[in-house]
Image: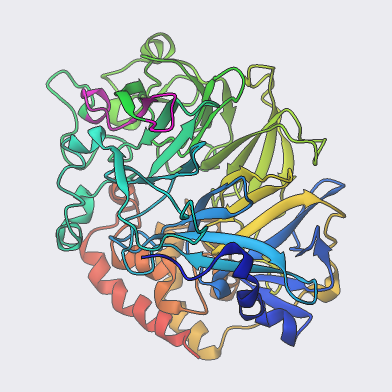
Amino acid sequence: MKAKWHVSKWITLFSVLAGSLAHAEVFEKSGYRVDATVLCDGLPQVQVGTPEGICVGILAGKQDGLKMPRYAVQSKEGVIYVSEMGGWAYAKGTIYAVYRGKDSQGVEKTAIVNLFPTKKLTMPNGLVMDPEGRLYVGTPTGVVRFSPRDAKTGHFNIDVTPEVVVNDFAKSIFRKDEYVSASEYNAMATKFKNKHPLLQMAVNSTFTEMYINVGAPSDDCGSGIKTVDENGKCIQSESPLASAAVWKVNLSNDPQRKVTKVAPFARGLRNSMALAVHPVSGVVIQGENGIDLPNEDLPYEELNILEEGRHYGWPYCHSRGEVAPNFQGKVTPEMCAKQFALPKVFMPAHTAPLGLLYYRNELLPSLKGKLLVAWHGYQKYGQRIVAYPVDERGVPTDTQYQEIVFGWKAQEGVRPRGAPTGLTALNDGSILVLDDKNGAILRISQGKKAEVRPEDLVVGDFSEKTLKAFEPLVPLVKKNCAMCHTQFQKDTGKEMLGEMRGTMLNLSSPSESSFWVKLKTRQMPPEMMRSSLGFHDQEYDQVLSQVEAFIKSLNP
């Protein structure tokens, strides 16, 4: 099926998607309070911290249909393609085409086209584009590709059947049965589901080498299908079809881009969502999301320079040669130091690096030649974008970082807690930022930094009904959740709710709040931490009715 829209005809959609601008100068978009008269390079400016000369604007949000945007790529013609997961669910995702242009009055507006309105994708995540204009999408069962636009007419292709490029890793025991159908996926016990199913990709400058993250099926090789073998080694990391690894795919250097070789490249990597290839040297760099420990300062996250055949230590070691809890007595600190590749840079704990970008453009001179990292984590070191200095090969030269976007914690009436994932350098040199938890597409550009004024703060209270419904949950979350979530370290339930707003609570659709969804599906507390917390499975049944009553109290 072909889309009825051509890029030149998108102008007819602009007034629909920008309706909020027509009715009020000050409005809310994905939890960000913006003023239509205060712009960042043409977009409504959001109030977050930045260095002088740099600002952040919002391009699109939940009001435009976004729910969980992850990564993006821009075509030569200027169309931005965004992977929209739609949630952690089977066949809920899509790819959006996003375009900026001027209406008949010369006003810049945004239009969005859903490329898979009915033939949904399962958890689309990584997104790259080849020189021929085809999109490559990472899904849990493989990398697929398709042409988003008809070469002759320029119309968007809608609900096409993507071509499978590579799915070798999906033949492993950890993935082959999980995504057969929605019924199979829904029926599978949570403890057996892959904990890191999302695929990320990065390619070299000639599009002849593609590197793919195949995340570990568990947090620490302590649960799920097949853990350790008779020698005490983690099967998830050591198997021939490595599931805690970055794989390398060689492609032919011609318009067909045929796959010529597929193999694991580097292993012992828990989840390589932050992945990049230096455009000149070809150096492959990875941001490691460490195991979940009940310590806000450990384990350190990592920046690793990946080399073929090397093992990077998961699940045996973490931080500066420390042995992981599951392998005490089986692995020694000396083994950690000598048998596994060492990180190039240690980053603060629980920052959850999900995006890497070698910035080489001229628009933002203070960032040129640096490596940008999106810290997605919700704990104290997260919610920001930082930059590391690198040499001409793209290898970090210092552990000190520069904060590019900061002060991104939730502030009532101003902004939600930031959750940056993908970073994309656009054709004009600005940087696109995907904010998945808030369903927003942001852009870093040149301009005056935001000033947060006291009069901008709009304090909103929760109803007495909601406060009363949350009160029985306060002891529960203090005991079981405060160790990892700073929201629950507050003294009162009212203060906790203020911190949860815009992050764990979705006030526009309470039933979709992560606080409710993760408890209902028994994802939290993490399985590995329950015994140390004294939390038992039967407690779920006792508290879920209370949590459900609280969620219902949020409905207007």
Identify the residue at horizontal 24%, vertical 23% (top origin): 238
Left or right of 188? Residue 119 is right
Is residue 144 depicted above or below 28 in this figure?
A: above
Residue 148: % across, % down: 45, 54
Residue 397: % across, % down: 68, 19
Identify the residue at horizontal 69%, vertical 18% (top origin): 391
Q: From the image, which quarter does the N terminus lie in?
A: bottom left
Residue 245 lies within the magenta run: yes
Is residue 491 depicted above or below 553 in this figure?
A: above
Residue 117 lies within the magenta run: no
Left or right of 59? Residue 269 is left
Which residue extends farthest front? 152
Residue 432: % across, % down: 64, 50
Among the 4 quarters of the image, the one containing residue 460: bottom right
The answer to whether residue 419 is seen in the rendering is: no
The answer to whether residue 98 is seen in the rendering is: yes
Identify the residue at horizontal 52%, vertical 42% (top origin): 354
Please tell me how many numbered marks the rendered image carries: 0
> The magenta stretch spans which residues?
236-257
* Relative depth, front residue between 404 and 84: 84
Which residue extends farthest left? 230
* Relative depth, front residue between 365 and 100: 100
Indicate the colouring scheme: rainbow
Left or right of 479? Residue 14 is right
* Relative depth, front residue between 238 and 164: 164
Residue 254: % across, % down: 43, 27
Is residue 82 depicted above or below 67 in this figure?
A: above
Identify the residue at horizontal 28%, vertical 31% (top origin): 326
Is residue 367 depicted above or below 541 in this figure?
A: above
